[in-house]
C-alpha cells in the first residue's frame, strides 16, 4: 500500500511539470535536502560512497565511517565481493535501515538465473530488502534478468531497479522490451568524459543519472584533481578540486558516488552543499571534455 501511494505521488508530481510542483518532481535534484525523487516513488540521496575495490575490513570500516559522517547512499555490486561487509556496516551503524539507500548489481554471469542471484544478494546484504538493483552492464539474457528484477519489485524484495553502463543505442533497444522504466542509469562520468549526449537523453526519460569514477578513476585521479581550470575554481571557493568536480556533477543533475577508504576524504566528499558554481564556472568545466573514457564498459 505504501509503495502504491509513493507511485501515485510521483505520477502526480510529473503531471504538474511547469508548476510549482515541478520543483520537487521526479528527477529534479533538491540541492538543499541532498535528495532526488525517483520514478519508482522513492527518494534517494544524491551523494554517496562507492565501494568498488574496497574489500574485507577496509570496506566495513569505510562504509561505517561514511555512515557516521552522514552519508546515506552506498553503492556495491556482486562483482565487488563486498556485499556482506556493506550489509554488516549498515546493520551495525545504528542508523535506521529506512534511512540508508543501498544499491547493488547483478553481473552478466548471473543473468541466466537472475532469480537465484537476487536471492543471493538479499542474503548477502541481509538488510531485508534492496533499495536499488541494477544490471551491471549489457550481456546475454539481460532483458530476462531485468524482468526477474521486475518480479522482485512486485514481491517487495527490491524497491527500485535500473541499469549500469547502458548508453543511447543500448537503451533504445532495451527499453521497449521491459515494463518498468529504469529509475537509474549509472555510467562513467567525469570532466574528461562528460556524456553530454547521453545524460540529457536519460534525464528526459525521467531516469536519474548517476556517475561512477566521478574523480576520474584509478590511475587518472591525480591528473584530474591537478587540472589548472579545476584548481582555479577551487581556489575561488576555498574548496578542494574533488569538491568542485562533485558539485559540478550535482548541478548537472548527476548523482555522485566517489570511493574512498580515507576518513578525511570521505568527510570532504560530503561537504558539497555550502557553495554553488556559477554558470561561467560550469561552462569552464564543460570545456574540459575530452571524450576520454577510463574503463572499458
Image (cartoon, helix red, strand yellow):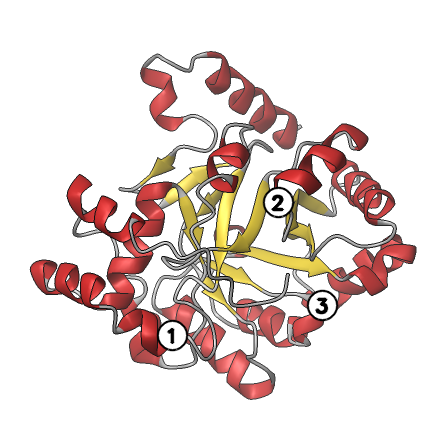
- Residue 159 in the image: state x and y as whole percent: 65, 43
Q: Is residue 172 left or right of residue 93?
A: right
Where disc 1 sits, the SS reads helix
Residue that mark 1 sits on: 221
Of callouts 2 and 1, the N-terminal one: 2
Q: Nearer the viewer, residue 295 or 111?
A: 295
Residue that mark 2 sits on: 167
* Above-or-below relation of 269 to 247: below
Give the tally of numbered discs: 3
* Above-or-below relation of 290 to 162: below
The answer to whether residue 271 is visible is no
**How far separated are the C-alphas under marks 2 and 1?**
24 Å
Quadrant of the image containing the C terminus: bottom right
Q: Residue furthest right?
A: 112
**How far separated are the C-alphas under marks 2 and 3?**
22 Å
Check if mark 2's residue and mark 1's residue have beta carbons within 8 Å.
no
- Residue 223 in the image: state x and y as whole percent: 33, 75
Quadrant of the image containing the N terminus: top right
Disc assigned to residue 78: 3
Of callouts 1 and 3, the N-terminal one: 3
Of callouts 2 and 3, the N-terminal one: 3
The mark lying in front, picked from 1 and 3, is: 1
Amino acid at each position: 500500500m505504501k509503495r502504491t501511494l509513493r507511485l501515485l505521488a510521483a505520477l502526480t508530481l510529473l503531471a504538474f511539470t511547469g508548476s510549482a510542483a515541478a520543483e520537487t518532481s521526479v528527477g529534479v535534484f533538491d540541492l538543499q535536502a541532498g535528495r532526488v525523487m525517483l520514478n519508482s516513488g522513492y527518494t534517494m540521496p544524491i551523494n554517496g560512497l562507492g565501494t568498488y575495490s574496497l574489500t574485507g575490513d577496509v570496506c566495513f570500516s569505510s562504509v561505517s565511517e561514511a555512515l557516521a559522517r552522514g552519508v546515506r547512499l552506498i553503492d556495491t555490486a556482486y562483482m565487488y565481493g563486498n556485499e556482506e561487509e556493506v550489509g554488516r556496516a549498515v546493520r551495525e551503524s545504528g542508523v535506521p535501515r529506512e534511512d540508508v539507500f543501498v544499491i547493488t548489481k547483478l553481473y552478466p554471469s548471473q543473468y541466466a538465473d537472475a532469480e537465484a542471484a537476487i536471492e543471493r544478494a538479499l542474503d548477502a546484504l541481509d538488510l531485508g530488502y534492496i533499495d536499488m538493483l541494477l544490471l551491471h552492464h549489457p550481456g546475454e539474457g539481460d532483458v530476462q534478468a531485468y524482468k526477474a528484477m521486475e518480479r522482485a519489485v512486485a514481491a517487495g524484495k527490491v524497491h527500485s531497479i535500473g541499469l549500469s553502463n547502458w548508453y543511447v543505442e543500448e537503451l533504445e533497444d532495451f527499453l521497449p522490451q521491459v515494463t518498468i522504466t529504469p529509475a537509474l542509469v549509472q555510467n562513467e562520468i567525469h570532466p574528461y568524459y562528460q556524456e553530454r549526449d547521453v545524460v540529457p537523453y536519460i534525464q528526459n526519460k525521467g531516469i536519474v543519472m548517476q556517475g561512477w569514477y566521478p574523480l576520474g578513476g584509478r590511475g587518472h585521479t591525480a591528473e584530474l584533481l591537478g587540472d589548472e581550470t579545476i584548481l582555479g575554481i577551487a581556489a575561488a571557493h576555498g574548496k578542494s578540486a574533488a569538491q568542485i568536480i562533485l558539485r559540478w556533477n550535482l548541478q548537472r543533475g548527476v548523482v555522485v558516488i566517489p570511493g574512498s577508504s580515507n576518513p578525511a576524504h570521505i568527510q570532504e566528499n560530503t561537504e558539497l552543499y555550502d557553495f554553488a558554481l556559477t554558470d561561467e564556472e560550469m561552462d569552464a568545466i564543460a570545456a574540459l571534455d575530452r571524450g576520454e573514457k577510463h574503463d572499458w564498459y
